[in-house]
């Protein structure tokens, strides 16, 4: 059963087309990430699914209803984390969750949500005094207090530090384990890889790819040789040095001839007595595949 | 433009029709039905929430209670033998001043800030009916206005030694309710014209200060042109001052003219809001799509 059905969706702003003939379905219980560069149409698409905007053409159904005309009962089945935090700074965490929880007959207990979002020590703190990551978790708490069947997460971890992102991920994982359908937009490829079982890549308002993260990686081109160099490692040969990320001290070499490139690396390691523990050969990372997709002139590489 | 009608009726379109894919009971064609709480408890929670937000706003307490209370104390302290006839216009003016500060200035200001910070957007997608959100805000602003008016009455009694009968206090507070409703409605109707949180305070002050000064709320103004004094009787502040003053002079609750003006502003303000109110933050021109689209964020 599909939680979301999007068919031939078009959204134009005057002469500008933000979304062009986008179609996809999301099965109930699935976690789907929508990726794309700025201007790709992902926020427009998600805002149409949330009911904020009307499509120019095409049809959209979320939990069987048109989001523009669906009423209170439908909204009780939806949870949203909007792109920007939208909270009353004067309320405490408990007060904010209580007032939103009062809108649902079968809301989660406030204490349960506070535990889920891992803010028990700040339950009585005013939201204005919380850090950005803590506010984002309150946003998520408000989104989930009504036990939504469908959760929209619009760039939920933008601006958060790595630890805060991991905490928010674990909350989402708990929800999806319970069967909640999630549609996630994000700029972080590792987030999509970690949370989503399916990735839809939008580019220039169209679907450029629709596949699982692993399938997407496999579409991304030639295999990649990855190796994190020890701190004391000498200079790589010229043929490899250009693929070294100095920040991570990691070699990431897209290789059309794995045998030849590996031979060069093994020769260098043997000559310099460098331990190659950790050497990997595999498909490109999701980031590599994504960048290859969004930089394609025609955009469309595959539909899953 | 998103108006209140766009999300008014639960499970229904603004015209009262059942939405496609939905049954009249609110159950979608696909998936399980969701029980919803009764509107009474929801409304009570909204009033409590809005009241909390107003009480925690220092502007409401300073401009709505501390300042008029201090002015009242100062004016009462100057006089040796205070009579009701002399004190009534001052007391009425400062109670109306307090009402304008809370129900108009503070309420409209916080509404614009809530819109620009995305708080209204969050409410709009919740299962809360739009009317319940506004009812909560209006009732809370009115309750706080009346509470402030009552405190000012006690301050006046304490400082002047004047006695207010139960009838006078009840009449005065009833006038305060009608005035607060008109001022709240005026403020809500003006919010679509205010395009940023930074602009809210100066734009509202442009209306608030002439309103309170020209209506004599903080002291009588003489030698105003006739057209201006006539105009003031058709704005919400002057009828409120006149009505409270009339009650303190032992007169009727409110004249027909004053009642009509306040009712007109209440109904007119709410009708304008119903049509033009905006839930989404305004976006600066450089962030808009061509043709003035309102959805430009990273598209």
Image (cartoon, helix red, strand yellow):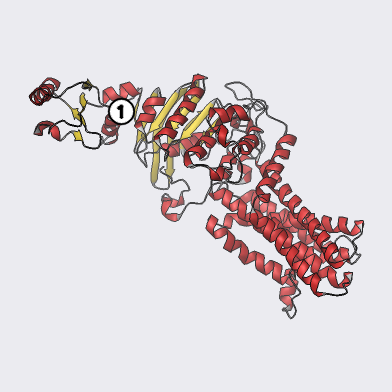
Of the pair A150 and B95, the residue shown nearer to us: B95
> Residue furthest toward the bottom?
B223
Of the pair A85 and A33, the residue shown nearer to us: A85
Of the pair B262 and B101, the residue shown nearer to us: B101
Q: Which residue is mark 1?
A: A286
Asked if residue A247 lies left or right of residue B192, the reply is left
Q: Residue B28: percent from the left, percent from the top?
A: 60, 25
Asked if residue A239 lies left or right of residue A79, the reply is left
Asked if residue B224 lies left or right of residue A243, the reply is right
Q: Residue B160: percent from the left, percent from the top?
A: 85, 67
Of the pair B143 and A56, the residue shown nearer to us: B143
Name the residue at 21% across, 23% down. Answer: A223
Where B278 falls versus B251 (above or below)?
A: above
Where A22 falls versus B32 (above or below)?
A: below
Name the residue at 17% across, 33% down. Answer: A243
Residue B74, quarter of the rendered image: bottom right
Tell me if residue A165 can be seen. yes
Residue B174, quarter of the rendered image: bottom right
Q: Residue B118: percent from the left, percent from the top?
A: 54, 45
Q: Residue A123: percent from the left, percent from the top?
A: 59, 36
Residue B124, quarter of the rendered image: top right
For the residue labelled by badge 1, is the local secondary structure a helix, a strand or a loop?
helix
Quarter of the image with the C terminus of chain A in it: top left
Q: Chain of mark 1?
A: A
Residue neighbourhood size for the residue with mark 1, other residues' Cα within 10 Å, grouped as few (<14), some (14–19), many (≥20)? many
* Number of residue marks: 1
Tell me if residue A83 can be seen. no
Asked if residue B249 lies left or right of residue A94, the reply is right
């Amino acid at each position: 059963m599909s939680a979301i059905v999007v068919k031939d969706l078009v959204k134009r702003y005057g002469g500008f087309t933000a979304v062009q003939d986008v179609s996809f379905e999301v099965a109930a219980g699935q976690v789907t990430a929508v990726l794309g560069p700025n201007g790709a149409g992902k926020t427009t698409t998600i805002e149409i699914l949330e009911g904020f905007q009307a499509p120019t053409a095409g049809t959209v159904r979320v939990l069987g209803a048109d989001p523009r005309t669906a009423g209170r009962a439908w909204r009780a089945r939806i949870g949203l984390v909007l792109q920007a935090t939208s909270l009353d700074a004067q309320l405490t965490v408990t007060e904010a969750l209580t007032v939103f929880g009062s809108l649902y007959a079968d809301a989660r207990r406030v204490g349960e949500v506070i535990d889920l979002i891992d803010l028990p020590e700040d339950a009585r703190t005013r939201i204005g005094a919380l850090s950005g990551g803590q506010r984002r978790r309150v946003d998520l708490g408000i989104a989930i207090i009504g036990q939504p069947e469908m959760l929209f997460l619009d760039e939920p971890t933008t601006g958060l530090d790595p630890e805060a992102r991991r905490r928010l991920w674990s909350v989402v994982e708990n929800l999806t384990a319970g069967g909640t359908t999630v549609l996630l937009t994000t700029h972080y490829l590792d987030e999509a890889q970690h949370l989503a079982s399916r990735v839809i890549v939008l580019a220039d308002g169209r679907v450029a790819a629709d596949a699982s993260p692993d399938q997407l990686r496999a579409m991304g081109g030639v295999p990649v040789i990855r190796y994190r160099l020890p701190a004391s490692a000498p200079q790589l040969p010229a043929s490899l040095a250009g693929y070294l990320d100095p920040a991570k001290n990691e070699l990431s070499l897209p290789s059309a001839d794995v045998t030849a490139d590996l031979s060069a690396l093994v020769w260098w390691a043997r000559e310099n007595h460098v331990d190659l523990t950790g050497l990997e050969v595999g498909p490109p990372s999701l980031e590599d595949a994504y960048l290859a997709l969004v930089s394609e002139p025609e955009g469309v590489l595959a539909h899953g | 433009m998103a108006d209140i009608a766009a999300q008014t009726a639960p499970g229904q379109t603004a015209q009262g029709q059942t939405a496609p894919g939905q049954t009249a009971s609110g159950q979608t064609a696909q998936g399980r039905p969701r029980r919803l709480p009764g509107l009474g408890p929801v409304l009570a929670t909204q009033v409590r929430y809005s009241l909390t937000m107003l009480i925690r706003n220092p502007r409401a307490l300073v401009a709505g209670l501390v300042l008029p209370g201090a002015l009242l104390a100062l004016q009462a302290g100057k006089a040796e033998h205070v009579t009701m006839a002399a004190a009534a216009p001052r007391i009425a003016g400062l109670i109306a001043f307090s009402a304008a500060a809370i129900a108009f200035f503070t309420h409209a200001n916080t509404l614009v800030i809530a819109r620009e910070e995305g708080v209204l957007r969050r409410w709009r997608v919740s299962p809360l009916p739009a009317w319940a959100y506004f009812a909560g805000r209006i009732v809370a602003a009115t309750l706080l206005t009346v509470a402030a008016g009552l405190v000012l009455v006690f301050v006046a009694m304490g400082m002047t030694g004047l006695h207010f009968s139960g009838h006078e206090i009840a009449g005065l507070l009833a006038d305060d309710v009608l005035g607060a409703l008109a001022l709240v409605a005026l403020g809500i109707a003006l919010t679509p014209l205010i395009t940023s949180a930074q602009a809210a305070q100066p734009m509202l002050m442009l209306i608030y200060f002439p309103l309170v000064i020209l209506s004599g709320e903080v002291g009588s103004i003489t030698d105003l042109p006739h057209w201006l004094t006539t105009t003031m009787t058709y704005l919400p502040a002057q009828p409120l001052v006149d009505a409270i003053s009339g009650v303190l002079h032992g007169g009727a609750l409110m004249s027909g003219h004053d009642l009509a003006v306040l009712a007109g502003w209440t109904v007119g303000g709410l009708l304008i809001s119903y049509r033009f109110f905006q839930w989404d933050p305004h976006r600066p021109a450089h962030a808009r799509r061509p043709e003035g689209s309102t959805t430009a964020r990273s598209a």
